[in-house]
Image (spheres, helix red, strand yellow):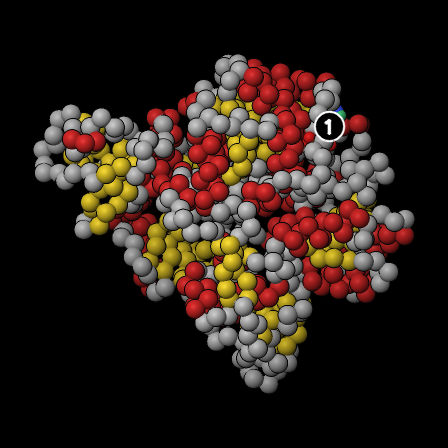
Amino acid sequence: MYADVLLPLPVDRAFTYRVPETLRETLQPGHRVRVPFRGRALTGTIAGLLRAPPPFPVRDIQGTVDPEPLLDAKLLELGRWIANTYLCSWGEALDAMLPPGVRRPATGRAPLAVRLAVDPPSPLKREAQQRLVDVLRQASEPVPVRTLLASAHCSAAPLKTLIRRGIAETVAARPDVDLMEAPEAAGAQDVTLTSDQARALETIAAALGGAPPRGVLLHGITGSGKTEVYLRAIRRAVDTGRQAIVLVPEIALTPQTVARFRVRFPRIAVLHSFLSDGDRARQWRAARAGEVDVVIGARSAVFAPARRLGLIILDEEHEPAYKQESQPRYHARDVALRRAELEGAAAVLGSATPSLESLHAARTGRLRLARLPRRIGERPLPPVQIVDMAAERRDIKRYPLISRTLENAVKEAVARGEQAILFLNRRGYATVIRCRRCAYILRCARCDLALTFHKADHLVECHACGSRKPLPDLCPECAVGTLWHFGVGTEKIEEEVRRRLPEAAAVRMDSDRMKTRRDYREALGGLWTGATDVIVGTQMIAKGLDVPNVTVIGVVNADTAFYLPDFRAAERTYQLLTQVAGRAGRGPKGGRVIVQTLNPTHFAIACAAAYDLDGFADRELANRKELGYPPYTRLVRILIQGTREPAVRAAADKLKALLEPRLPPVLVHTLGPVPAPIYRIKGRYRMQFLLKAADLEPVRAAIREAFARVKGSRTLQVIADVDPVGMI
Ligand code: ADP
Ligand code: ZN
């Protein structure tokens, strides 16, 4: 007997091996095995078993990795679909479907967190090491390795050095699963559904019952009771002996969220990146063994091994976090819909601000549509007031950070003992630092990006690569000019709030401040107890925060997304404003929203202020149709990046020359290659090439052929991103 084995390599084929006698009885498709490959031993997955020997000599499978196949036939098939759709190999797709602790069984070592052993008195020479120290210094508890490396934007090597030098030390992480237990009660158990909710549930029930389409878009405004509908839908699936997967964006995966589901479904598994690999593997195996009814997790939980899957719920379906930004670059929303189809399950996409892709699918009948247009308890949506910042500037004759309208609203709220949230999607103090004399703008040495000034640390930081250094006293270019800075970040707004409202207790919530869950707990605790009056924060606070005493929401600058070179700029603006507004008026006191903008008549802002999703969608879909953007076409973004600029340019041109003759000219539009919006990141030059087509099939074939001829290397990478979400 022989087996076709898929290896986690960027190669579009399976490799055939002989099955040794001892394994004949055991091996099945989906089984992982060890095989010799080019002098190494690799772990691969069996795609299929063959009786006839292949017409070439083959080697033996060395042994199995797991006692049973980890992936069943449907997940194998899903992996094949991902490989085809997102242009990776089947083996790479399968590899990405397993959580780390399952992929490489935990070595028995405890999951680690890191803390400072000694506080180094002087700055470290190596930037990455210094960044790690900065993060650890600010943390109030040991930081899990994964979180640490992500916040410091660095690899494991500098951390190892710190540990070797005795500056940092490892401690066993706390049992993370327990941290997912919520302290508070998790909402009423036996509510009567509103008529809107009952209708939405019936729509989902029809999809659960098997009638196509099996996908449902649940558009429910914030506070309309979507979660209750999810819970009832899950109940129906579970009562018929099936399992459910609930996907939420990483940031929404809080103990409170988990608790709401756990109260109704005690047999639940949680897949969270805060979990250690070992804990995650245990949760995954419990799901696979059928010991749980519900799996809740972030993006990759879409691959959870539920054997009798009945329902997938994807909450906040518009969230960009559902797109994986490393190979394979899958979109969990599309994977969920595909998986539901393969498993005969239903999929519910829920949001207060659906993506235009999903809304268009619902309008054209590819998804069912259910709507919850009212808040529970008929609580009105908070009125949104738009403040024209150009007019404000003319009136007060200087550039205002906080308009008089917003200032007064916050003052009045604080005076009444209520709370306010000021929202700005930029962290740091000032976003541009310039020489007074020669007008030179401070830029990152490795990225084409202006440096941001972080006043509290007296540092400049590159928001592309995370490198930080002290703010120089004089211009590094002319060596005599002094520096000044402008552009507004959360730190400056926090300072402005303290200056203008000295009586208010203000707290900043952004990733500079919030390093650990303890920081969050304290900040959120301050809101709950009333110790905090004003929160200034980035999009970290745009969702999920549900504090009844918050009555004023200020959007400091509604225009930040407009400056991004992204065809979704208007959609992002609409979504952000609507989500932020949803934080106000959750309690009986009601609330109001104040939006500061230089574009007071822009339809994205006007429609958001009127809570008019359909009006917004009509306008924006018309634009997309005219310009040939999704959902009317699909995009592939090809990114060519490398350390040697001429090689990157040459590879981009070569790729274009290879691709264009392979593409049907009328059906596929090509744009570029042009420099990516940030041309250089971490010393790598980046060119991009955009392909637009109604049907991606011929495009994929052309890309596969072209990519086979442009070889990547350590210094040059060629990346295809199908249905891209990030355009930078
Ligand atoms: P959404 O997820 O749409 O923002 P939630 O599901 O969180 O809304 O519901 C908002 C609040 O209303 C929650 O506190 C929830 O417990 C409550 N709720 C939901 N449905 C009902 C209902 N039918 N009757 C009474 N309260 C409800
Ligand atoms: Zn940089």
Residue 196 shows in the view = no
Measured as percent of width and height from the top left, residue 295 is found at: 52, 32
Q: Give the image quarter of residue 362.
A: top right
Left or right position of 570 against 695: right
Q: Quadrant of ligand 1?
A: top right
Residue 262 or residue 468, whichever sits in front: 262
Residue matched to label 1? 188
Q: Is residue 690 above or below residue 647?
A: above
Left or right position of 167 against 588: left
Measured as percent of width and height from the top left, residue 16 is found at: 18, 36
Q: Is mark 1 within 8 Å of ligand 1?
A: yes
Measured as percent of width and height from the top left, residue 552 is found at: 80, 46
Kind of residue sitting beneath label 1: Ala
Q: Is residue 601 above or below residue 443?
A: above
Which residue is at 76% across, 52% downward?
Answer: 526
Which residue is at 27% across, 53% downward?
Answer: 711
Measured as percent of width and height from the top left, residue 188 is found at: 73, 28
Q: Quadrant of the N terminus?
A: top left
| Residue that lies at the very extreme toward the bottom in this rendered image | 480
Q: Of helix, strand and loop, which one carries label 1?
A: loop
Which residue is at 70% across, 43% downward?
Answer: 545
Left or right position of 582 against 321: right
Q: Is residue 262 above or below residue 453?
A: above
Which residue is at 38% across, 49% downward?
Answer: 107
Residue 428 or residue 291, whichever sits in front: 291
